[in-house]
Image: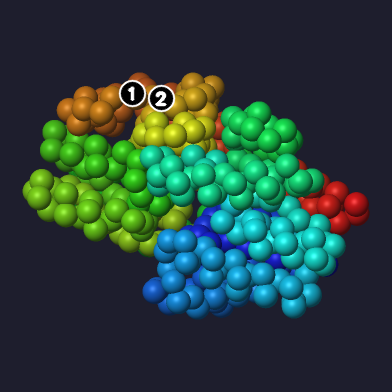
Amino acid sequence: MKVCISVTNDVLADQRVNRVALSLMRNGFSVCVIGRRRKINVDLSLFPYNVKLFCLIFNKGPLFYAEYNLRLFLFLLFNRTDVFLACDLDTLPANYLVSLIRKKPLIYDSHEFFTEVPELVGRHRIKRIWEWIESRILPHLQYAYTVSRSIALAYNQKYGINMEVIHNYPLRKNNPEIININLKTANEHIIVYQGSVNLGRGLELAILAMKFIENTRLVIVGEGDIKDDLVKLTKDAGLTDKVTFTGRVPQQNLYNYTRQADLGISLEEDLGLNYRYALPNKLFDYIQAEVPVLVSDLPEMAAIVRKYDIGRIINSNDPRELALCFKSMLENEDDRFRWKQNLKDAADELCWEKEEPKLIAIINRATKA
């Protein structure tokens, strides 16, 4: 049985898509992941499943979404597929139409609260268009899941749809492959941020905080819309020796960066409900690498940190206060010992092995309906 997974994100870096695809393969499904070709060359041999990347004329804005969905519609319409799995609202129109035409099951994986992302907050006309699309499709979906209970409840209140929750937990790192990647120099602390380098991630604040702390380096792992602005900010602030940008890192190498850190940060700003209810990949990657975490005082992330006592929560936009928090978390040995012990338990619980059965149960219900 063949499942086609559609996504507009970078398939090389999208951990959730990769985990879902591998879980389906382990359970006997044939998998094809459909995305778009970006400027960087992607070695498709890195993927154990089929990958189809569209070469598009447009790469952003309304014409991009229209072109992608048209290409996706035609591809899905004429290729053998038993189940359509749409990742996020921007792939849903094509999947929904083809599922109706071909009378095949459609499953919706909402990676985020799409209409509440920071890029749409304040852009009322564009947001209304996406909400119109959402309102025409979501109430008719039988099978859907998302990343946090808060987002599931928000969709239920908005459309009456009952979404299940499949968290962004990584695979348990019992015997990880260690690659010789060395970030540290002698007597240096490493603070890591990994993920999309986009608006509202608190990265400007983290960079400026580095002015007020010594023997410490901030390593930003990833790519995104504001990376060039952050590189300029780093240079203008004279912090090039304290802030390192690695660029995009393949999924299979990411753990080898994360595990070297002394502190992992997830400092999302409260820019709409999507960030407020976020439970990002990076938080759980830090946990699997047993790295203490510092997170924003947003309900879902803060609840994880409080429940497992694996770091601290901060509510400040002052670089000096953030630097003091960094310093305390890096140097307080009693706290660090306690967090390290608690991280082992958290890593055992917050792993993909606990989420995979939920995914397979949804797929099986859809295929047997």
Residue 199 in picture, x, y percent from top left: 34, 46
SS category of the residue bearing label 2: loop
The image quadrant where one finds the N terminus is bottom right
Residue 264 image point, x, y percent: 37, 39
Q: Is residue 29 left or right of residue 205?
A: right
Q: Residue at x 54, y 49 (%)?
A: 130
Q: Are marks 2 and 1 in contact (CB under 8 Å)?
A: yes
Report the amino acid beneath label 2: Asp
- The residue located at (60%, 73%) in the rendering is 71
Looking at marks 2 and 1 on the same chain, the residue that comes earlier in the sequence is marked by: 2
Task: Tell me the residue that label 2 is attached to.
Answer: 297
Above or below: residue 51 compared with residue 162: below
Towards the viewer: 132 or 149 = 132
Vertical placement of residue 319 versus 145, above or below: above
Residue 181 drawn above or below residue 323: below
Q: Residues within 10 Å of mark 2 (few under 14, many from 20)?
A: many
Residue at 86% x, 56% y is 367
Q: Is residue 307 above or below residue 7?
A: above
What kind of colouring is applied to the model shown? rainbow
**Furthest-front residue in view?**
125
Whether residue 27 is visible here, answered yes or no, is no
Horizontal arrangement in the rendering, residue 64 relative to residue 30 (left or right): left
Residue 7 position, x and y percent, is 58, 61
**Residue 19 image-quadrant placement:** bottom right
* Residue 147 picture location, percent across and down: 60, 40
Cα distance in 3D space between marks 2 and 1 = 6 Å
Type of the residue with mark 1: Asn
Q: Nearer the viewer, residue 70 or 202?
A: 70
Q: Which mark is residue 341?
A: none
Q: Which residue is mark 1?
A: 315
